[in-house]
Image: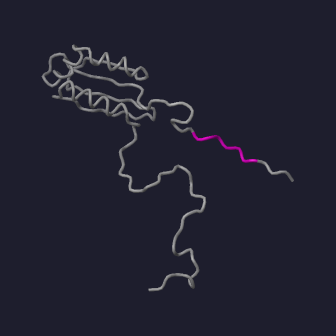
Amino acid sequence: MPVKAIARTSIARNGVGAFVVPCHKISVQYCNWGGSSSGLRTLLKSGQLNQLAKDKKSIFFEVVKKSGHPKVSFHYNNDVVTDVNIANMNSSQILNKIDEYSQRSGDKLIKFNHKVMSINDSVRGIWSPMHTPKDHRYKI
């Protein structure tokens, strides 16, 4: 009787084969007359945001003029939208926020305490001291 392989599709991993930027769209919202949008207005007048858009060609930039406090919305590939309030920030702080959030994956930040992180299941299974026979257990 011949042995047949189990059909399984490969797991897509970013960076293996081709790299796809996790952040695909950045929406910048500002007010034309509000005081909290002054840093963003100077950033738009200076043309630094245009230069940033030219440097990051894989990200679509959208500028929306709307009343209210300024904010930047980051749209990620895993259907997560993150809104960042940039009220009363100067242009360099806004550029730092855009650079920081555009490099994220969109997942929540977690504290990771282990040395190895793997998406594959363990070959040996889960170990517990209760899996050993009672005769071989450590006695106190």
The foreground one among 26 and 31 is 26
| Residue drawn at the location 57% of the way across and 77% of the way down | 132
Residue 105: where, in percent of width, then height?
Answer: 41, 37
| Residue drawn at the location 56% of the way across and 54% of the way down | 121
Residue 111: where, in percent of width, then height?
Answer: 35, 51
Q: Tell whether 117 sits left or right of 133.
A: left
> For residue 60, what is the image quadrant?
top left
| Residue drawn at the location 29% of the way across and 23% of the way down | 28
Q: Tell whether 9 sits left or right of 140.
A: right
Residue 52: in magenta span: no
Q: Quadrant of the C terminus?
A: bottom left
Residue located farthest toward the left when viewing the structure as drawn: 35
Residue 101: where, in percent of width, then height?
Answer: 33, 33
SS majority, magenta: loop
Residue interval drawn in magenta: 5-11
Does 86 appear above or below 2? Answer: above
Residue 72: where, in percent of width, then height?
Answer: 29, 27
The foreground one among 25 and 54 is 54
| Residue drawn at the location 39% of the way across and 22% of the way down | 56
Does 109 appear above or below 42? Answer: below
Q: Tell whether 1 sits left or right of 92.
A: right
